[in-house]
Image: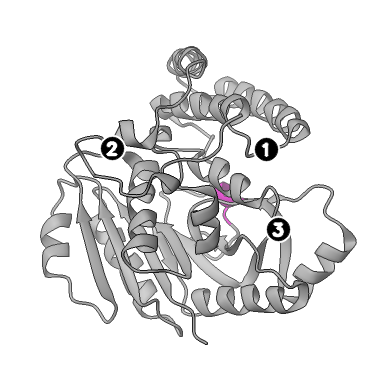
């Protein structure tokens, strides 16, 4: 029995990259039934492009009147995929992602092979993410599943993958049952670490894998880690990591200790290496201050912008 795959793409003011993303999706060896495109109030002609877009895959376009960031956009798109399109799998990506022709086919094959070997599908399957020149992208390093059993590692290997704990929202195939069970991402994150929290949440008690043969290009401006010099966006890195570590039950207590230590080390290196240290220090202090208050509910963030329809999908568990 074939499975219904719905792709979800969130875009903001990157029309040319969006066209590349859609070409990648629609040139695959296996196609989704629908692509949900969430336009975060773009002002660069994206709306006009989408109004006339007519690709080989049915498109469901949602135009928001306000930029909700990647986090809010995925909340809208994933809810739509599950409720309006009855997805079995939701394949999500940003607008600077270019899935290669076999990306979806290989991810589906790995998920089904894993299910055949273990009796249960992985919570999500992540593509290998490379830069435009084919090198593995350091921004999208997969976090390994520490303490994974030998049996779980062997099961993942038989499916052509490796055990992971978290992944970025750059071509990941999510079992829609996980969305129904664990809810949606947290819109108030806006940008950064919403994918860390969400993938950790749905994989805490069910394994996830990355697959070498499923490949997506990440069209960032430069080859490097996201924390190299984030400028004013450093605020979101700090605030949202604090939310992950103190307000979410996505990570286990010992994972929170390990990840917190890694974050402090990385923040120190980021500030030390930045030509504008004062800006980053300001972002650090604001992020720490605002991270003390819990994120708003998805209903509060989307109030008056987009009507969420199923309370079971409006947010994840909190500690």
> In the image, what residue occupies the spot 35% across and 59% down?
9
Q: In terms of sequence position, does the residue under pointer 2 or pointer 1 come before the other?
A: 1
Q: Which residues are magenta?
A: 137-141
Q: Residues within 10 Å of mark 2 (few under 14, many from 20)?
A: many
Circle 2 sits on which residue? 302
Decide: marks 3, 1 in contact (CB < 8 A)?
A: no
Q: Is residue 127 visible to us here?
A: yes
Label 2 – label 1 distance at C-alpha: 26 Å
User: Looking at the figure, which quarter contains the C terminus?
Assistant: top right
Label 3 – label 1 distance at C-alpha: 14 Å
Say left or right for 197 vs 72: right
Q: Against 165, is 187 above or below?
A: above
> Is 107 or 221 nearer to us in this picture?
107
- The reply to whether the magenta stretch includes residue 118 is no
> Is 169 or 140 nearer to us in this picture?
169
Say left or right for 46 vs 168: left
Q: Secondary structure at mark 2?
A: helix
Say left or right for 130 vs 286: right
Q: Please state the total of marks drawn on the protein image.
A: 3
- Where residue 81 sits, quadrant-wise, is bottom left
Q: Residue furthest front?
A: 311
- Where residue 111 sits, quadrant-wise, is bottom right
Q: Residues within 10 Å of mark 1 (few under 14, many from 20)?
A: many
Q: Secondary structure at mark 3?
A: loop
Q: Against 289, is 10 above or below?
A: below
Q: Is residue 173 visible to us here?
A: no
Marker disc for residue 251 = 1
> Is 72 or 276 nearer to us in this picture?
72
Q: Position of residue 161 (x, y in %)?
A: 71, 69
Label 2 – label 3 distance at C-alpha: 31 Å
Q: In terms of sequence position, does the residue under pointer 2 or pointer 3 come before the other?
A: 3
Circle 3 sits on which residue? 207
């Amino acid at each position: 029995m074939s499975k219904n795959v719905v792709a979800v793409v969130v875009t903001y003011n990157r029309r040319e990259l969006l066209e590349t993303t859609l070409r990648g999706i629609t040139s695959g060896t296996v196609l989704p039934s629908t692509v949900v495109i969430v336009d975060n109030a773009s002002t660069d002609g994206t709306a006009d492009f989408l109004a006339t877009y007519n690709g080989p895959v049915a498109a469901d376009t949602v135009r928001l009147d306000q930029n909700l960031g990647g986090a809010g956009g995925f909340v809208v798109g994933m809810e739509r995929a599950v409720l309006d399109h009855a997805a079995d799998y939701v394949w999500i990506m940003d607008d600077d992602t270019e899935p290669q022709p076999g990306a979806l086919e290989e991810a589906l094959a790995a998920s089904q092979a894993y299910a055949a070997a273990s009796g249960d599908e992985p919570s999500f399957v992540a593509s290998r993410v490379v830069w435009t020149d084919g090198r593995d992208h350091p921004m999208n390093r997969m976090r390994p599943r520490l303490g994974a059993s030998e049996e779980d590692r062997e099961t993942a290997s038989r499916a052509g993958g490796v055990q992971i704990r978290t992944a970025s929202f750059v071509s990941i195939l999510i079992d829609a049952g996980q969305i129904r069970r664990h809810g949606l991402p947290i819109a108030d994150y806006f940008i950064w670490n919403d994918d860390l929290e969400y993938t950790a949440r749905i994989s805490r008690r069910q394994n996830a894998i990355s697959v070498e043969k499923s490949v997506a290009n990440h069209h960032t401006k430069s080859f490097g880690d996201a924390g190299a010099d984030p400028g004013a966006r450093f605020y979101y890195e700090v605030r949202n990591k604090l939310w992950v570590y103190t307000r979410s039950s996505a990570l286990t207590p010992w994972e929170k200790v390990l990840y917190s230590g890694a974050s402090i080390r990385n923040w120190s290196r980021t500030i030390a290496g930045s030509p504008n240290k004062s800006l980053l220090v300001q972002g650090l202090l604001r992020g720490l201050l605002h991270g003390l208050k819990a994120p708003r509910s998805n209903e509060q963030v989307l109030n008056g912008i987009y009507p969420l329809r199923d309370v079971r999908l409006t947010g994840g568990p909190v500690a």
